[in-house]
Image (cartoon, rainbow, N blue to C red):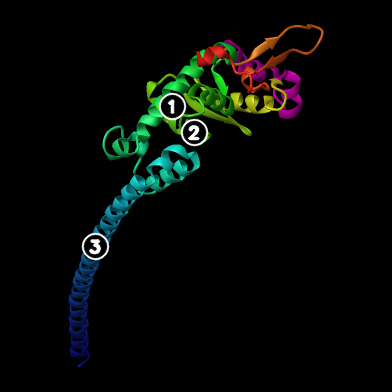
Amino acid sequence: RSSKTLTNKGGDFLSNMHLRRKAGKAGLAQRQKLNERFDKVAEDMDADLHDSMVAKMDVFKQNLEEFAKKHKNKINKDPKFRHNFQKMCASIGVDPLLSKKGFWSNILGVSDFYYELSVQIITVCIKTRPKNGGLLEMSECLAYLRKIRGPHSQQVEVSDLEKAIKLVKVLGDGYRVIKTGSKELICSVPCELDNDHSILLTLAEEKGYVSFAMTSEQLSWTKERFDKTINLLIQESMAWLDLQDESLETLYWFPSLLAKNLDKLDDDVSA
């Protein structure tokens, strides 16, 4: 009896194991089918959402075009209004600046405005480069441009200059905007300025010059670090070496950061 009992128990155990394996396989297959159904529903929902968003964006673009037609004069004449309009365009991936042909150019002349402005910026940078070494403060450039353009042309603001400079970048001649503390400078030379150069320019903002003593006291710079940084700026004529009095500390002036009398702009720029 004991042997039969063990045999029966062994057979029951194997049978139960077989049933559990079959149930496990069936459960896995059922879960896989359920996951596939969920994936299909998710794909359908994504497709519907995408189609809905595309339709809404098309409607928004149409409304934006109608808005542009209606407010064309204000967009062209009012810099702040124009800036807000460009932000609306950017929110849906439309860039009037890059639309050289088509709706934006035909209706607004926006891209033509920026291409013209970019050429004027290049002119100002080139003519002032012998004096500032290729670093021109943004506000000073704006004053030059207003003088060149005259009182009856479209008004321009700093935001317009920043967009126009993006166009100039394609020339690959180093045109870019450098931020140093509270100032923005237009750089029109191809040399690479690293973080130390930016720190030195920021330090020079208040007085228009720097010295090794200033960097040593305020930045804990070594003489080697200072010389390496200032030498490139001198080489590119962005900084001027002051040797008027050898008994005093050597100063390095930045013409782009010196106080300017903006009411007496150079006549050669507007010539």
First in residue order: circle 3 vs circle 1:
3
At 54% from the left and 12% from the top, the residue drawn is 268
Q: Residue 128 carries which label?
A: none
Magenta-drawn stretch contains 14: no
Query: Toward which corner of the image does residue 248 lie, by quadrant?
Result: top right
Q: Residue 249: x, y in percent? A: 78, 13
Query: Toward which corner of the image does residue 7 lie, by quadrant?
Result: bottom left
Q: Residue 244: x, y in percent? A: 75, 6
Mark 3 vs mark 1: in front: 1
Residue most extreme to the right: 247
Which residue was labeled with disc 3?
Answer: 48
First in residue order: circle 2 vs circle 3:
3
Q: Is the magenta stretch mostly helix, strand or loop?
A: helix
Q: Name above or below for residue 204 compared with residue 240.
A: below
Estimate the spatial distance between the alpha carbons at disc 2 and disc 3, rounded to whole Å: 45 Å
At 17% from the left and 81% from the top, the residue drawn is 15
Give the magenta part as a residue range: 210-236
Q: Along the horizontal axis of the image, is 87 left or right of 61?
A: right
At 56% from the left and 20% from the top, the residue drawn is 135
Between 194 and 103, which is closer to the camera in this rendering?
Answer: 103
Which residue was labeled with disc 2?
Answer: 155
Which residue was labeled with disc 1?
Answer: 117
Tag 3, which secondary structure?
helix
Q: Is residue 191 visible to us here?
A: no
Tag 2, which secondary structure?
loop
Q: Label 1 is placed on what type of residue?
A: Leu
